[in-house]
Image (cartoon, rainbow, N blue to C red):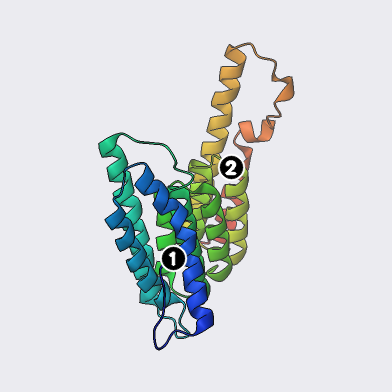
Amino acid sequence: GPRVRGPSVGAAMAERIEQRLEDRVPELEQLERVGLFTRREIRAVLRKASALEYKIQRRALRKEDFINYIQYEINLLELIRKRRARVGYSFKKDEIENSILHRVHCLFNRATGKWKEDLQLWLSHVAFCKQWNAKHQLSKVFSTMLAIHPNKPALWIMAAKWEMETRLSSESARHLFLRALRFHPECPKLYQEYFRMELMHAEKQRKEKKEFEKAKMDLGEFSYSEDILRGEMARIIYRDAAQKVKGD
């Protein structure tokens, strides 16, 4: 494997870096084996990774070292994507991309764990999850971020909308809105978005019920709450909001 030695690298640290580089070898070997990268490119990736790895294993950590490392991995993912498209090869994603994606999530988690206040870092992780369709991961990022930044209604709205529109989970969205309203009982924008979500949900349920009835399916096994179908939930929120947001 690649040797890592230098004046400021203690034995333990060198070992850790070496281990991390060795963890990369299987994915790089796959890249070479399937003809997406050349042997020379693989060696270049290892050299670069070694330098990046060294910087985030030091005692005095710098945010930009993490950002550079993450950016390098994202560029690598993009390059692999382009090469795959060019040669029409779509296999081995588990062994190649997933291993890189996992590393990027770990880097983001370490960075947001250390620089909790930096909202830009959190939002970069959110954007990364969305771009690579990492739904399970994004749910976790949202919940950790909101635990640290509960004071920003826009973040609650972003998380709830994503749960509703991408994961199609009105349950999770409602849960987020209700928690947000406990922190921000007088925020008109939150009520507005929550209201919109409940209306969309009621509308969706109405449509589904119509379709089921058209298909003469047995509705017995579906528990449609009559209240929701009548838009009752939206009315309750509206009444509540009207009382709390005075003069709005």
- Callout 2, which amino acid? Ser
Q: Residue furthest left?
A: 86
> Could you tell me which quadrant the N terminus lies in?
bottom left
Above or below, comparing residue 164 to residue 225 in the picture: below
Question: Which residue occupies the foreground of this view, 74 or 139?
Answer: 74
- Mark 1 lies on residue: 1
**Residue placed at 44% from the left, 41% from the top?**
92
Helix, strand or loop for disc 1: loop
Q: Which quarter of the figure has residue 148?
A: bottom right
Q: Observer-nearest residue: 205 or 46?
A: 46
State the residue lying farthest toward the bottom.
Answer: 7
- Lateral position of residue 92 relative to residue 171, left or right: left
Marks 2 and 1 sit apart, C-alpha to C-alpha, by 50 Å
Q: Is residue 39 visible?
A: yes
* Residue occupying the point 51% across, 47% down: 135
Most extreme residue toward the right, as rendered?
A: 220
Report the amino acid beneath label 1. Gly
* Residue 19 vertical position relative to residue 210 in the rendered view, above or below: below
What residue sits right under mark 2 in the picture? Answer: 170
Q: Position of residue 192 (x, y in %)?
A: 49, 51
Quick one: label 2 or label 1, which is nearer the N terminus? 1
Q: Position of residue 172 (x, y in %)?
A: 61, 48
